[in-house]
Amino acid sequence: MYSSSMSKFVLLFGSCTVLTLFFQMSSLERMVISDGDDETSQSRIRRRKLGDGCYHVLLDVGANIGIHARFLYEPDRYPDSMTSVAAFAEKFGSQRDNRDYCVFAFEPNPKFEQRHLDLENAYNAMGWRYTPILAGVSNSNGNMTFYHTHMEKAESEVGFSAVTPKTLYGGDATAKTVQIIRLATWIQDEIQDR
């Protein structure tokens, strides 16, 4: 398939591209790991990773309604996008095969769960890999209190945040405990060495 090809990994936090990594991939489908020569080799099967088979990876951290995936997969539908569509064209090229891309959308707001599941189903039906991760990210695993600030627009909620409501929003908020995962560990477990 894509043996020894240059792959890209892009990490988004909200609307900012934070990190673009380029790395060599020796194989996309490394399921058996060899521990010696052919005669004495003991092979072990490794756990399948979410990133297995992905050539390029986009992590959308704080995905909200999943719009960055749409900018990547459907740029022609967003001619007024001033930054994201252009950034993806610069990082990945303007002519691309969406089957080469995997998007992992991290979003802890339960309000958007169904939308992400709908995007996953629609994109998967087209052969595109979109995977919602219904959790927040941090430097450790656990739970965290986020606040619904009731500052909704038609489809988005601008103020779902871990910032205390009195600090930023004047106190009119509803608390919600959400799952938090350690991003570095998730990348190591699900993306690295795929």
Image (tube, grey):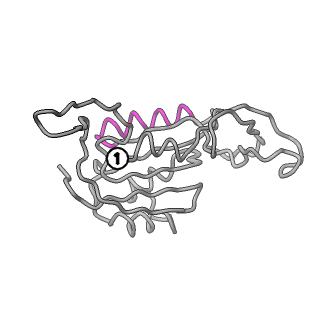
Residue 87 horizontal/vertical position (percent): 45, 67
The magenta-colored residue range is 113-128
Question: Does residue 60 lie above or below 8 as drawn?
Answer: above
Residue 111 horizontal/vertical position (percent): 63, 34
At x 53%, y 31%, the residue is 114
Residue 78 horizontal/vertical position (percent): 45, 59
At x 50%, y 41%, the residue is 186
Residue at far left of view:
39
Assign a secondary structure to mark 1. loop
At x 33%, y 44%, the residue is 194
110, 31: nearer the viewer: 31
Q: Which residue is mark 1?
A: 193
Q: Of helix, strand and loop, which mostly describes the magenta segment?
A: helix
144, 24: nearer the viewer: 24
Residue 8, by quadrant, is bottom left
Amino acid tagged 1: Asp
Residue 99 vs residue 108: left or right?
A: left
Residue 147 vs residue 29: left or right?
A: right
